[in-house]
Image (tube, helix red, strand yellow):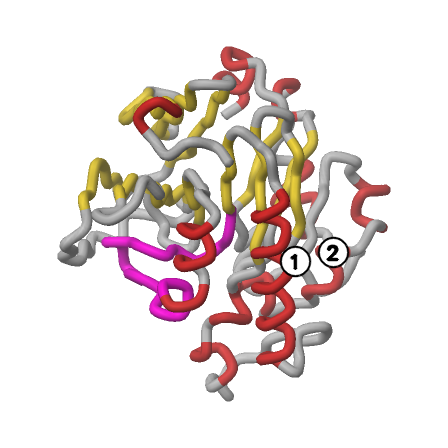
Amino acid sequence: MGKMGDKLDLDFVVSTGDNFYNSGLKGVNDPLFLQSFSNIYTAKSLRKQWYSVLGNHDYRGNALAQLSPLLRKIDRRWFCQRSFILNAGVAEFFFIDTTPFMRKYFNNSNRHYDWRGVLPRQKYLKTLLKDLEEELRKSTARWKIAVGHHAIRSIGHHGDSPELVKHLVPVLKANNVDMYINGHDHCLQHISSTDSPLLYLTSGAGSKAWRGDVKETHFDVKFFYDGQGFMSVQMTENDTNFAFYNVFGEKIHHWKVTKSTMHPSI
């Protein structure tokens, strides 16, 4: 990542959640923050701002710790909120807290989840969707990118997320979002919609991988890789180039999207 970051002269880094395995952070002083973040991403090119969302494993620990500004005093690169917007000039990134959408986590009595600030769940989700739709509608960005932890469409181990298909997809499509980037499934994949220009991109291969199970789908799967790796996105006014890399920094898939072949910006 460091080598590719230097080559691409990156502006910032996005983390798609499950930032700290296996059960998030215990608190703001948890040594795991240094062990799994600060002491790992040491390359000069990666010493840029990081923008992160929470994953389901992060909710198993002290979720509020990852949102705390105290972590930014330990490492100024760190920025994590539940849902937020990043204005990157030619594009706006809409970070979405997807874990509370998943009903199964609320029905699981065997595991602890830190739902402080989320309950009552239905009210939280209603507000989240209302705010997201409002901000997407207001956006005049040339490109709109949504980022969440859970996959909407996936042929990996976890597969599709029915709750996100039901609640999130209509909002993304109605507001001309260009792509949805997620983690959760430990793989790299590129899936195209059959009924809209919306692209589904999974970059969840930062650590544990090689699960070996692939699901069938009627969606247009452009690329799937079961091993470790990462992705890059380069954007201009008219073009977006994204690529997937393996752990050696070798480009294993790339794709170019131009606005002339996609829906117009509103």
Q: Residue at x 41, y 59 (%)?
A: 170
**Real-space CA distance between mark 2 and mark 1, rounded to the nearest whole angstrom:** 8 Å
Mark 2 or 1: in front is 1
Q: Secondary structure at mark 2?
A: helix
Residue 84 position in % (x across, y down): 67, 50
Q: From this viewpoint, which residue is outermost toward the front?
A: 266
Point 57% across, 60% down: residue: 97
Q: Residues within 10 Å of mark 2 (few under 14, many from 20)?
A: some
Numbered range of the magenta stretch: 147-165
| Percent x, y of residue 167 | 44, 67
Name the amino acid type tagged 2: Leu
Tell me the crowding category of disc 1: few under 14, some 14 to 19, or many 20 or more residues within 10 angstroms, Cα based. many
Q: Nearer the viewer, residue 44 or 81?
A: 81
Q: Is residue 150 magenta?
A: yes
Task: Pinpoint residue 119: horizontal percent, then vertical percent.
Answer: 66, 80
Q: Residue at x 45, y 18 (%)?
A: 238
Q: Is residue 140 above or below residue 94?
A: above
Give the amino acid type for the residue marked by disc 1 in the picture: Arg
Report the predominant secondary structure element of the magenta stretch: loop
- Asked whether, in this view, residue 217 is left or right of residue 19, the answer is left
Whether 178 is drawn above or below 121: the answer is above
Which numbered circle lies on residue 182? none
Query: Residue at label 2?
Result: 67
Asked if the residue at tag 1 contacts the one at tag 2, i.e. Cβ–Cβ closer than 8 Å, the answer is yes
Give the image location of residue 171, x and y in percent.
46, 57
Residue appearing at x 43%, y 79% in the figure: 104
- Reading the image, the residue beneath label 1 is 82
